[in-house]
Image (cartoon, rainbow, N blue to C red):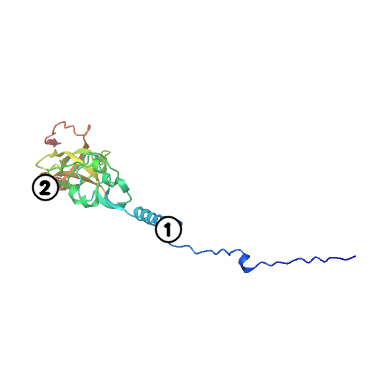
C-alpha cells in the first residue's frame, strides 16, 4: 500500500505583506485644540490678577473723628482720613481731598464717631458767620444732660462786693454744645461750645470773674427772651 506524503507548503509573510506601523506625532502649534487651551489658560491668569488687584485697592475717604450732630458746623478735628474698600460705592462718600474744604459746612444729619462721612450728611455751603470754639469751666451740678449738637444758653453770676451786689446775666444765647473738653479742674468740668467771634472776649472774661450756668434750650432753638441783668441778693 503506497502512502502519499502530503507536504504542506509553508508560506511566510514577506516584507511587503506586514502592516505599516503607526507613529505618534508630537502636537503642533497649528493644532486648534492646543491653541484654544493656551488661550483659556492666559484668560484665567489675567482674570485672577485683576480680581486680586481690585480686592487690594482702597479709597481714601473722610471719617468722623467724633460724634457729629445735625446742624453742627464742621471744625478742625471733626474729621480724619480713612482708607477703606468701597468699590462702586466710593461716590457716595466725601473723599480725603475735601478735608480742608468742608470746614464751616453744616451737618444735615448726625454721623457717629468712626463712621464714613456721606455726601448727603453735609450742607452744600458754609456758614458765613465766623465762630470760635471755647472751653467753659462749669460746676458739674450746674450742667444738664447734654448731647453734642444741643443748643444751650450760658449765664454768668458774679460775686457780690461790699459796694455792689452780685448780678446774673445771659452771656450767650442759643450756642451749640460740642462736647466735654479733655480736662477740667477738681471742682469744674470743661464744656466746649461754639460762639460768635464777637462774643469771645466777653465770654472769656465772664469765665474768669463769675460762675457759669449752662441751660439747655427746650425745645431746641426756641428763644424765650433774655433775662437781662438780675441782681443777686
Disc on the earlier residue, 1 or 2: 1
Residue 117, how many percent across, how many down?
Answer: 26, 45
User: 220 or 107: nearer the eye?
Assistant: 107
Image quadrant where one finds the N terminus: bottom right
Q: In the image, is 220 to the left or to the right of 226? A: right
Q: In the image, is 128 to the left or to the right of 97? A: left
Snapshot quadrant of residue 46: bottom left
- Which residue is at a point 22% across and 52% down the rendered structure image? 97
Query: What is the CA distance from the residue labelled 1 to the residue labelled 2?
Result: 82 Å
- Which residue is at a point 45% across and 56% down the rendered structure image? 33
User: 47 or 56: nearer the eye?
Assistant: 47
Residue at far front of view: 2
- Which residue is at a point 21% across and 50% down the rendered structure image? 98
The local secondary structure at tag 1 comes to helix
Q: Count the numbered circles shown.
A: 2
Picture layout, residue 140 above or below residue 45: above
| Residue identifier under label 1 | 35
Residue 88, how many percent across, how many down?
Answer: 31, 46
Regarding residue 184, the answer to whether it shows in the image is no
| Residue identifier under label 2 | 201
Mark 2 Cα shell of 10 Å, populated few (<14), some (14-19), many (≥20): few
Snapshot quadrant of residue 122: top left
- Which residue is at a point 10% across and 41% down the rendered structure image? 164
Amino acid at each position: 500500500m503506497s502512502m502519499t506524503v502530503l507536504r504542506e507548503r509553508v508560506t511566510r509573510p514577506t516584507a511587503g505583506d506586514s502592516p505599516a506601523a503607526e507613529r505618534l506625532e508630537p502636537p503642533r502649534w497649528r493644532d486648534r485644540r492646543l491653541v484654544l487651551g493656551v488661550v483659556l489658560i492666559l484668560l484665567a491668569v489675567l482674570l485672577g490678577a485683576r480680581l486680586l488687584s481690585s480686592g487690594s485697592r482702597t479709597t481714601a475717604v473722610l471719617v468722623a473723628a467724633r460724634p457729629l450732630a445735625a446742624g453742627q458746623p464742621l471744625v478742625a478735628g471733626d474729621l480724619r482720613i480713612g482708607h477703606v474698600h468701597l468699590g462702586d460705592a466710593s461716590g457716595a462718600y466725601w473723599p480725603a481731598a475735601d478735608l480742608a474744604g468742608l470746614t464751616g459746612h453744616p451737618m444735615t444729619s448726625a454721623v457717629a464717631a468712626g463712621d464714613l462721612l456721606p455726601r448727603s450728611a453735609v450742607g452744600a455751603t458754609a456758614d458765613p458767620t465766623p465762630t470760635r470754639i471755647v472751653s467753659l469751666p462749669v460746676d458739674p451740678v450746674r450742667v444738664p444732660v447734654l448731647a453734642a449738637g444741643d443748643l444751650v444758653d450760658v449765664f454768668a453770676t458774679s460775686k457780690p462786693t461790699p459796694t455792689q451786689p452780685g448780678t446774673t446775666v445771659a452771656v450767650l444765647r442759643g450756642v451749640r454744645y460740642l462736647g466735654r473738653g479733655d480736662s477740667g479742674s477738681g471742682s469744674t468740668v470743661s464744656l466746649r461750645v461754639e460762639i460768635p467771634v464777637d462774643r469771645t472776649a466777653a465770654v472769656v472774661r465772664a469765665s474768669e470773674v463769675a460762675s457759669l450756668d449752662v441751660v439747655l434750650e427746650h425745645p431746641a432753638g426756641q428763644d424765650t427772651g433774655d433775662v437781662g441783668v438780675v441782681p443777686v441778693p
